Image: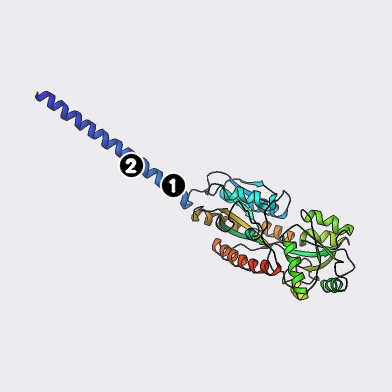
Amino acid sequence: MKDLIDYAYHTEETVTKSIHRLAAVLLTAVLVLFAAQATAQSGETYPVQPIRIIVPFPAGAVMDSTARTLGQEVSKSIGQQLIIENRPGGSFIIGNLACAKAAPDGYTICLNTNTYSDLVFSNLPYDPHTDFAPIIHLAGISSMLVANAPFNSFKEMIALSKAKPGSINWGTWGHATAPDIHLRWINHQMGVNITAVPYKGGTQTIPAVISGEIQITQLAVGFSMPMIRAGKLKAIAIIGDRRSPQLPDVPALAEEGASTGILSYFGLFAPAKTPKPIVDRLNSEFDKAMRVPSVQEFFRKTTLEAIGGSAEQFSTFLKADGANAAKVFKTIGIRPVAAN
């Protein structure tokens, strides 16, 4: 009997020790898991794989070129490839939706333009205000009015429009795009009724204005300069409150007694809930890349206004810009419509 009791005691002791050892192993595994997760969220080891940048513009567009130029510099710094994925179409909705629905782990980010698309479309499959985490304000877009028409200045255009209502057609890129908003705002400010003619994009308005199908349109400054120098188009005004260094003789709209109503810009975003240390790391890397001489030369040649700054500064800017856009849209009668 004593031997049986001793055997049972030792067996129970062995099982207890085994349970304790197993519990210790499990606890260690849990602690390691939490430590790894905390390290990943802190950004200490990030990134450990390539990063995808979704660009909702076609290859070759200035936003695409910007993403590729900056991506090359950031790749050198972090030791990981930045892969550009073009997802154009659907008024930027296709690319933005892919970004919004991606895992918030820092391995999918996106380049985006004005984020008040909820003022434009009534059926967005994402919320532009809550489904994205701002990373960095990359650039302001310098654009201008170019014409093939009897008038040679903004004031002459307004005078002709008042003398002959309906005689001027302005090429836009569709409902509530930047050229459409600027036209409506100018009509409102100047008391004129210049006609909007929608096209699919800026590349379609170029042959239209050169051929005389329309009289005026809005294009990026850098894109317009060769055609202006060749005498195919006239430079009418810079969109904004100051002149372009590339075209110092062309007045800004503000000098002509008008304003733009809204700003044109783009920046980088991550899916909402991306850990802040990762957002901060991305911000730091892209902000640093923007100060590289070759990148600054790229911005100069494309006439983009490099901005940069912190993620918090970009977030503050977006809130103010969205509030301003809401006022402008209400004034000029732009209401949300269903996206195609």
Q: How is the image coloured?
A: rainbow
Q: Position of residue 114 (x, y in %)?
A: 65, 60
User: Measured along the vertical axis of the image, is residue 112 above or below residue 183?
Assistant: above
Residue 197 in view in this figure? yes
Label 2 CA crowd tier, 10 Å (few <14, some 14–19, many 20+): few
Residue 289 in view in this figure? no
The image's mark for residue 207 is none
Q: Label 1 amino acid?
A: Gln
The residue closer to the viewer here, 143 or 178, is: 178
Q: Label 2 amino acid?
A: Leu
> Marks 2 and 1: in contact by CB < 8 Å?
no
Measured in 3D between alpha carbons, the distance from the residue under mark 1 to the one under mark 2, in whole angstroms, is 15 Å
User: Measured along the vertical axis of the image, is residue 26 above or below residue 302?
Assistant: above
**Quadrant of residue 265 within the rendered picture:** bottom right
What residue would you read off at disc 1?
37
Q: Position of residue 285 (x, y in %)?
A: 57, 55
Query: Label 2's element?
Result: helix
Q: Is residue 42 left or right of residue 209?
A: left
Label 1 CA crowd tier, 10 Å (few <14, some 14–19, many 20+): few
Q: Earlier in the sequence, mark 1 or mark 2?
A: 2
Q: Is residue 144 left or right of residue 18?
A: right
Which residue is at 85% across, 67% downward?
A: 166
The residue closer to the viewer here, 325 or 249, is: 325
The image's mark for residue 27 is 2
User: Measured along the vertical axis of the image, is residue 190 above or below residue 228?
Assistant: below
Residue extending furthest toward the left: 2
Query: Label 1's element?
Result: helix
| Figure label count | 2
Q: Is residue 190 left or right of residue 286?
A: right
